[in-house]
Image: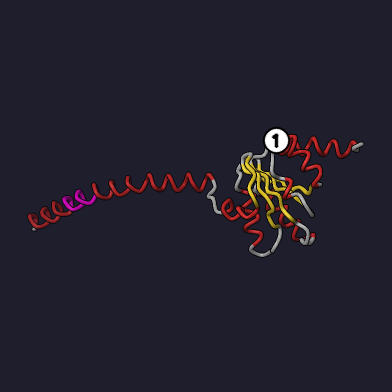
Amino acid sequence: MPSSKNIKQLEELSDKLSRAKAVYVTEYLGLNVDEITELRKEFFSNQVEYKVTKNTLLKLAAKKNNLEGLDGFLNKSTAIALSYDDPTSPAKVIKKFNKENDLPQVKGIVFEGEVFDGSEFKRFADVPTKEESLSKIIALLQSPLTKLVWTLKSPMSSVGNALNNLKENKSN
């Protein structure tokens, strides 16, 4: 008979999995307290929830949310990074953190309901954020307009300079 504590955790975990746009299943064992605290701060500042979970509870919650294929990733110590807004933000935090540390290692990824192996992590970490993509599009749209303005302005400046020179020559 499961304990009431485990039942409550299962319900919370099921709810979080149902709302999350992305879930990164990680191996965290080997990080010391200072490193884990720093990692949690980074996740928190990027609106990502980082939670250590029991593999059996995560398996049950995944099954409850019809997420097939997670069982292979749920071994050893497991922590999950949940993103409810930007599905790539956990990957960016982990990538940045891994520049100085070997862990956490991504074992598996649930991205918008689809399960991927941890080897796909780099692909997700390199995807630009929504804001980066929008700024690139705006820059591309502005570029032709800026060139057009300078092209139209250039002959007018030349005509203006020629008229000004002509005026100065006539007045002398």
Q: Give the quadrant of the C terminus.
A: bottom left
Kindly identify the residue that appears in the image at 62 percent across and 43 percent down: 111
Task: Give the quadrant of residue 11.
Answer: top right
Please state which of residues 153 and 54 is positioned toward the viewer in this rendering.
54
* 142 to the left or right of 21: left
* 136 to the left or right of 100: left
Residue that label 1 marks? 66
Tell me the kind of residue under disc 1: Asn
Question: What colour scheme does the image use?
Answer: secondary structure
Please state which of residues 102 and 162 is positioned toward the viewer in this rendering.
102
Q: Is residue 154 magenta?
A: yes
Kindly identify the residue that appears in the image at 30 percent across and 49 percent down: 147
- Write the start and end of the magenta stretch as one range: 153-160
Q: Is residue 52 magenta?
A: no
Kindly identify the residue that appears in the image at 62 percent across and 58 percent down: 96
Q: Secondary structure at mark 1?
A: loop
Q: Position of residue 55 (x, y in %)?
A: 79, 47
Kindly identify the residue that appears in the image at 71 percent across and 55 percent down: 39
Q: Position of residue 70 (x, y in %)?
A: 71, 45
Magenta stretch, main secondary structure class: helix
Please state which of residues 166 and 38 is positioned toward the viewer in this rendering.
38
Q: Residues within 10 Å of mark 1 (few under 14, many from 20)?
A: few
Q: Give the quadrant of the N terminus.
A: top right
Q: Position of residue 36 (x, y in %)?
A: 75, 57
Q: How many marks?
A: 1
